[in-house]
Amino acid sequence: MAKIPATIVTGFLGAGKTTLIRHLLQNADGRRIALIINEFGDLGVDGGILKGCGIENCSDDDVVELSNGCICCTVADDFIPTMEALLARETPPDHIVIETSGLALPQPLVRAFNWPGLKTKVTVDGVVTVLDGPAVAAGTFASNVAAVDAQRAADDGLDHETPLSDLYADQVACADMIVVNKADLLGDGTAALVARLKGESRDGVQVISATQGALPVDVLLGRGQGAEDDISARHEVHHHHDDDDHDDGHDDHHHEHEHGHDAFESFIVDAPEVTDPAQFATKVSDVIRSHDILRLKGFASVAGKPMRLTVQAVGPRVDHYFDRPLGTDTRGARLVVIGQAGLDRAAITAALQ
């Protein structure tokens, strides 16, 4: 059986994680998504926002809150039993989304997916780190640093304190995708910040901007990173810390933001059938790098082969495999290209053809 994919959403208090997740649920296209939310204290702010929201395919039973401490410090006690309970359901979810607390380290959580009870059943589809764009540009990492420190000081369960700069570095280092949120407030400085973060990130990490966390589902989910098998590349500055995260200030959880999709575009490229799958995959990777494409997926026939070739690319990483007989399918290739608005469609199409 295929492993159930899980997406980890991390980032500081107020960056916009809950808003991003709510938008994801509203545009889930029928996927059954279960949420695990790491809360502190008795407020249950994020869970209250997401529970009872009336979003199709997201019932109250699909929202699970962990309120017994920082998720990176209570993995064995809280997180793993919760995951095992979700996986044991008669109808398990199609996808699991985990929202960490505002100061939780993602690395220990990723490592937990190698736990014997989870390893064969679930995989980390990707780690998404949400940043407060204006705050990061100003070098403060969070819009209200005093509130972050106050909540950290108020948590009796904390046995560690870490500079915010180190926590920020860990969250960024673990990311497969960095979302520079509140781009509408950042204005003309968005492109420069995105470029800087991309230059500071390891190869293959995608950095994109968003307003109110409005990103297409196909950009966030289905990344297939298998992060638990790549933990050594996700350098940790330290190994401990925490905090509660309920988005405040700029984000309005009850407002629609469909206009966010205007910043993205997708189109279909029809091309001749493939002669050499490996060379084709290399070509696709080159095109993705040249044009900063976020996702590329589709199918192709291979000369002299009766099977259909599936192509899935996240950033420059391209996976390709034969999945089934072609049958009556038309020979050739059909690829869906997804990226931020402004893609050079003509150049991309010509290169892929």
Image: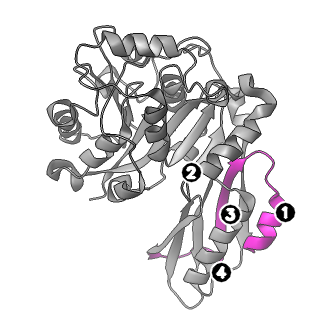
Q: Do the residues labelled 1 and 3 touch (CB within 8 Å)?
A: no
Q: In this view, does 261 lie to the left or right of 217?
A: right
Q: Is residue 22 magenta?
A: no
Q: In this view, does 351 lie to the left or right of 237?
A: right
Which mark lies nearer to you, 4 or 1? 1
Say whether disc 3 or disc 4 marks the residue closer to the N-terminus.
Answer: 4
Q: Which of 292 and 300 is in front in this view?
A: 292
Furthest residue in direction bottom, as rendered: 304
Q: Is residue 341 magenta?
A: yes
Q: In this view, does 318 lie above or below 60?
A: below
Say whether disc 2 or disc 4 marks the residue closer to the N-terminus.
Answer: 2
Q: Which mark is residue 273?
A: 4
Q: In this view, does 9 lie to the left or right of 71?
A: right
The CA span between labels 1 and 3 is 16 Å
How far across and how far down the image is residue 314, in percent?
55, 57
Instruction: Return the residue at label 1.
Output: 346
Element on which disc 4 rests: loop
User: In which quadrant of the rendered image does the N terminus lie?
Assistant: bottom left
Which mark lies nearer to you, 2 or 4? 2
Instruction: Return the residue at label 3.
Output: 289
Q: In this view, does 51 lie to the left or right of 264?
A: left
Q: Which mark is residue 292?
A: none
The total of numbered circles placed on residues is 4
